[in-house]
Structures are given as structure tokens and as C-alpha cells.
Image: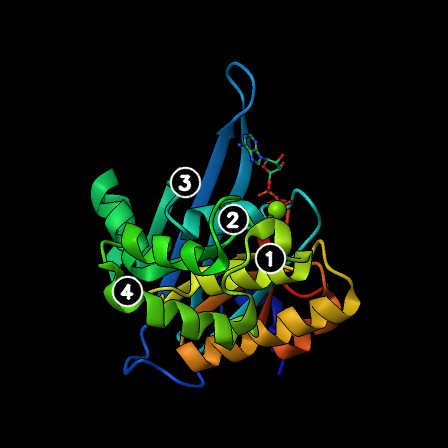
Amino acid sequence: MQTSLPLDSAAHQTASPKTSRGSLEPVLSLSNVTLEYPDGEDKTLLALDNVSMAAHAGTVTSLVGPSGSGKSSLLAVAATLLAPTAGTLTINGVETTALNDRARTQLRLGTTGIVFQQPNLLGSLTALEQLVLTGMLQGRSRKGLQRESLDLLAAVGMADASHRRPHQLSGGQRQRVNIARALVGNPQLLLVDEPTAALDHDRSAAVMSMLCELTREFNAATILVTHDTEFLDLTDATLHMRDGKLTAAS
Ligand code: ADP
Ligand code: MG
């Protein structure tokens, strides 16, 4: 189901929750978020311009827009990797802009899975080890992570490849491991940046439907940046971005 919204609600679009972790509160909300990058001596580039949106558990929100419109910047802010210049970012009811770096990192590790556009897997580690390491970085012991990691690899159809290293995997397989890795620790918020950019049509379709299924299975709030408008109907709502602003569907 794809929701299209009238122009006057474009600044506050949300996917309605199909399921919930027991609360109707959004997992993520951005309120009047502005992000400026330094751009030459006294100049700044306005990458996000008064953006407000929310994401709920168990829903996929797709984010589309031309190259340079601010999609990756929005994900970087949602991931607390970049602090907004103005506005507020709330995750699980916690206003992140008030936190110090350490508290923000802890919040990210405990709540957020990130799938970057390029599967930045570590070359020397097997698929299984990539996931176990991620869990250990979350402060968990190796015990339990092995089972969880194998289950996640199975969930993305990679059970038989758990002992392969990245160079022994195809592009599509690497992206599946990348997605499984982001799901370690059952994140409430899943941020995914153009996961199918390097994949052919059939593999793109498989990855997109897998992400939507996993979102429901794991009850995550997922934001999915994509060029693949063909697959938008799989998602619960679509946000359109242009020049750093959320706009109505065009
Ligand atoms: P998209 O993901 O939609 O292609 P981005 O969020 O990457 O867009 O970029 C939005 C704007 O911010 C673009 O004009 C881009 O050139 C600029 N930009 C992105 N990252 C930086 C950066 N680190 N420093 C300065 N400008 C940046
Ligand atoms: Mg981008």
C-alpha cells in the first residue's frame, strides 16, 4: 500500500503503524530539522530545510528524490551521525540533540541498524563474524550472538554462506549480509540507503521485498532510500525530497 498525501500535510508525513511494540508513539521523529554543511569560507549549503517526519514500528517509509536532494543527509541525521543545525530529533522518546556524544553513541548502538549504500564489510571476516562483531560492539558477549547471527543469515537466505568472506560473495549476497548485520540486536530503527543501487532487477526486487518482510517480522521502523520507484508499492508510505525539503508526491 502506498499512501499519497495532500500538499498541506507534506511536512508531517507518517506511515500508520500496522503493528506496534505496544506504543503508538513513533520510534523516530524529526521536527523542523535543518542541516547545513560548511561550503567555502563563510558559506553554508542547506542540505535539510525544515524537515519534519516520523517513522513507526512495523512500517517501511520509502524516501525518494533526485541525487543531491538530501536523502543521505536525512539518514545521517536520523542515525545521529550528524547533529542537526536546528530542530529536534527524537528516538524512542529521547530528544537526541540534548545528549552528549557518548550517550548518543550508546543510544545509536542500542536502537539503530544502518545499511549503507556500499556493503562496507570487513574483508578478513566471514559473514558470520561480521554479525558477531557488530553484536560485540553493542557490548554483548559472544555467547548467544553466534545463534542470533546464524538465524539472521538464514532470514536473509544466506545460511549456507555463513563461512564465506566478502570476496567469495556476489554483490547481491554481500548486500544481504549487510542487511543481516544491521539487524543484529533487533534494532527498533532500521535506516537503509539505496540498497539496490548496484544490483540487477531481479536481485533488487528480492532485496526490496526482503527488507519489507524483515521490517514486519522484526517490528522495526524502517526508512528506505531508493531509486527503484517500481517497488514503492511494497512500502507503507513514500516521502519525496527535493532541495532538502519534503514535498508532496510529484
Ligand atoms: P542525496 O543522498 O539525496 O543524493 P545528500 O544528502 O548526499 O543527497 O546531499 C545533499 C546535499 O548536501 C548535496 O548538495 C551534497 O552535495 C551536499 N553534501 C553532502 N554531504 C556533504 C558534506 N559532507 N559536505 C558538504 N556538502 C555535502
Ligand atoms: Mg545519497
Q: Amino acid at mark 1?
A: Arg
Tell me which label, 3 or 1, sits earlier in the chain.
3
- Label 1 to label 4, Cα distance in Å? 30 Å
Q: CB of mark 4 within 8 Å of CB of mark 3?
A: no
Scheme by which the image is coloured: rainbow
Ligand 1 position by quadrant = top right
Between 207 and 73, the one lying in front of the other is 207
Give the mark toward the camera: 2 or 3: 2
Q: Quadrant of residue 230?
A: bottom right
Residue 209, horizontal then vertical, whole percent: 62, 76
Q: Which residue is mark 2?
A: 121
Write down the residue under mark 3.
82
Q: Between residues 242 and 64, which one lies in front from this camera angle?
A: 64
Q: Given contact means CB atoms under 8 Å apart, are the residues at marks 1 and 2 in contact? A: yes
Cα separation, mark 4 vs mark 3, equals: 18 Å
Label 2 secondary element: loop
- Does the beta carbon at disc 1 come under 8 Å from ligand 2? no
Q: Residue at x 24, y 58 (%)?
A: 94
Mark toward the start of the polypeptide (2 vs 3): 3
Q: Amino acid at mark 2?
A: Leu
Say whether mark 2 is within 8 Å of ligand 2: no
Percent x, y of residue 133: 35, 53
Q: In terms of secondary structure, where does tag 4 sit?
A: loop
Q: Vertical placement of 180 versus 167: above or below? A: below
Whether residue 185 sits left or right of residue 106 in the image: it is right
Q: Earlier in the sequence, mark 4 or mark 2?
A: 4
User: Residue 92's mark?
Assistant: 4
